[in-house]
């Protein structure tokens, strides 16, 4: 599993700023972290999927898969 501590630290920092802009950015960072997890799990679980194929998949499809 990828190391998410650096991402969660950034999200916490943004949440502590408590501005509309920082909350929006924190939400985006959360989404990107979720996508990173999904892409990694898909790559690990499905050996038949090439790295090039994963690059072309949209995040929504990966999350649903």
Image (cartoon, helix red, strand yellow):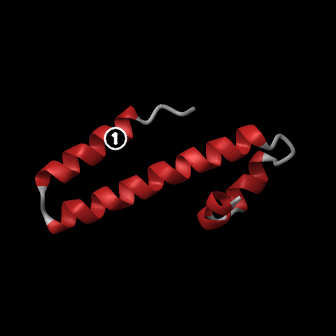
Which quarter shows the C terminus?
bottom right
Q: Residue 34 vs residue 13: left or right?
A: right
What kind of element bears circle 1?
helix
Residue 44 vs 65, above or below: the answer is above
Taking the view exactly as shown, the residue that stands out farthest to the right is 48
Counting from the top left corner in percent of width and height, residue 16 is at 14, 49
Q: Residue at x 63, y 49 (%)?
A: 39
Residue 19 vs 36, above or below: the answer is below
Q: Residue at x 37, y 60 (%)?
A: 28
Counting from the top left corner in percent of width and height, residue 12 is at 24, 44
Which quarter shows the N terminus?
top right
Counting from the top left corner in percent of width and height, residue 4 is at 43, 36
Q: Residue at x 49, y 51 (%)?
A: 34
Q: Residue 49 vs residue 54: left or right?
A: right
Q: Residue 13 vs residue 6: left or right?
A: left
Residue 54 vs 24, above or below: the answer is above
**Figure quadrant of residue 27:** bottom left
The residue singled out by tag 1 in the image is: 8
Q: Residue at x 28, y 43 (%)?
A: 10
Q: Residues within 10 Å of mark 1 (few under 14, many from 20)?
A: some
Counting from the top left corner in percent of width and height, residue 24 is at 27, 65
Looking at the rendered structure, the number of numbered marks drawn on it comes to 1
């Amino acid at each position: 599993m990828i190391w998410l501590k650096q991402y969660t630290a950034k999200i916490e920092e943004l949440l502590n700023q408590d501005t509309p802009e920082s909350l929006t950015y924190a939400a985006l960072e959360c989404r990107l972290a979720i996508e990173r997890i999904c892409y990694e799990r898909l790559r690990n679980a499905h050996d038949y999927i090439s790295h090039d194929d994963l690059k072309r998949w949209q995040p929504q499809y990966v999350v649903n898969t």
